[in-house]
Image: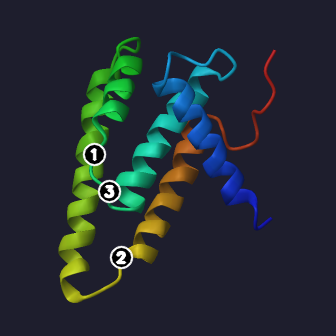
Amino acid sequence: MADQPKKDEAATSSAVAGAGGGGPDRGVPENERLNAILLGIIEREVGRGEPRRVEDWNTLREMAVTHGAGMELVTTFEGVIDRCNREMIGRFGGHGVDLTRLRESVVMLIRVSLAKKLGLDGSTTRES
């Protein structure tokens, strides 16, 4: 069980590479590619406080073009990420609190929620 997060991170990295690299990975369903891009952004920007990677956001925008409200959702997602970081830093960072555990907790909550929204929570693993 302790190996599970490492497997999730490896799967996320692999799918992100397929989604943002040399074109779509035909072996990875669209919702899993989207999940990987979103989680990659969340883990870097919220989980580790790293600066925004333009190529990830460009890939996300490219994927959103095919969906009706996709661009609006990307803009909303971007605002949520920015607001989340500002809140953590503003409320806790200035008081000498180590944000590492808070960031990890926020990422875990988002991962669970996102997996459920995209149907990747383990209950829908088979495809025909």
User: What secondary structure is marked by label 3?
Assistant: loop
Q: Is 34 located above or below residue 66 in the figure?
A: below
User: What secondary structure is marked by label 1?
Assistant: loop
The Cα atoms of the two marked residues, 1 and 2, are separated by: 18 Å
Q: Quickly name the residue at label 1.
A: 52
- The percent coordinates of residue 28 (x first, y second) are 66, 23
Q: Residue at x 52, y 44 (%)?
A: 114
The answer to whether the residue labelled 3 contacts the one labelled 2, judged by CB atoms less than 8 Å apart, is: no
Front residue of this view, candidates 15 and 38:
15
What amino acid type is highlighted by mark number 2? Leu
Q: Quickly name the residue at label 2.
A: 99
The Cα atoms of the two marked residues, 3 and 2, are separated by: 13 Å
The Cα atoms of the two marked residues, 3 and 1, are separated by: 7 Å
Q: Which mark is residue 50?
A: 3
Quadrant location of the N terminus? bottom right
Left or right: residue 128 versus residue 94 is right
Front residue of this view, candidates 115 and 14:
14
Front residue of this view, candidates 28 and 20:
20
User: What secondary structure is marked by label 2?
Assistant: loop
Q: Residue at x 61, y 19 (%)?
A: 25
What amino acid type is highlighted by mark number 3? Glu
Q: Is residue 33 in sight in this rendering?
A: yes
Disc 3 versus disc 2: nearer the observer: 3
